[in-house]
Image (cartoon, rainbow, N blue to C red):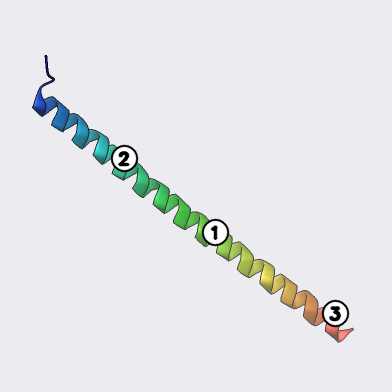
Amino acid sequence: MAPDSALVTATIGTVGTVLIGFLGFLNVRMTNAKTSEQALIDRLEKRIDKLEESLVRR
């Protein structure tokens, strides 16, 4: 006996919706991670610049 087409359609729609939502969640997480990583890199570059300036003064 073949499954009901409405049930198959509803299942595919639900799985698709959950998948798209999860991919959106991962996209936001990756974007936030890149932003945090860039902020850390910027802070480290500032520290390096300050250290270089203090070494040049000596």
Left or right relative to 29: residue 48:
right
Residue occupying image coordinates x 61% and y 69%: 42
Residue 24, label in figure: none
Which comes sooner in the sequence, label 2 or label 3?
A: 2
Q: Which residue is mark 3?
A: 55
Other residues around mark 3 within 10 Å, as few (<14) / some (14–19) / many (≥20): few
CB atoms at circles 2 and 1 under 8 Å apart?
no
- The residues bearing labels 2 and 3 have C-alpha atoms spaced at a distance of 54 Å
Q: Which residue is mark 2?
A: 19
Other residues around mark 2 within 10 Å, as few (<14) / some (14–19) / many (≥20): few
Residue occupying image coordinates x 79% and y 78%: 52
Q: Check disc 1 and report its element: helix, strand or loop.
A: helix
Q: Which residue is mark 1?
A: 36
Three-letter code, disc 3: Leu
Q: Position of residue 49 (x, y in %)?
A: 73, 77
Residue occupying image coordinates x 35% and y 42%: 22
Considering only vertical position in the picture, is 52 above or below 16? below
- The residues bearing labels 2 and 1 have C-alpha atoms spaced at a distance of 26 Å
Classify the position of the N terminus by image quarter: top left
The residue mark sitting in front, 2 or 3, is: 2
Which comes sooner in the sequence, label 3 or label 1?
A: 1
Three-letter code, disc 1: Ser
Which comes sooner in the sequence, label 2 or label 1?
A: 2
Q: Check disc 3 and report its element: helix, strand or loop.
A: helix
Query: Which is nearer the eye, 39 or 13?
Result: 13
Residue occupying image coordinates x 45% and y 50%: 29
- The residues bearing labels 3 and 1 have C-alpha atoms spaced at a distance of 29 Å
Considering only vertical position in the picture, is 9 above or below 24? above
Q: Check disc 2 and report its element: helix, strand or loop.
A: helix
Q: Position of residue 3 (x, y in %)?
A: 13, 20
Three-letter code, disc 2: Leu
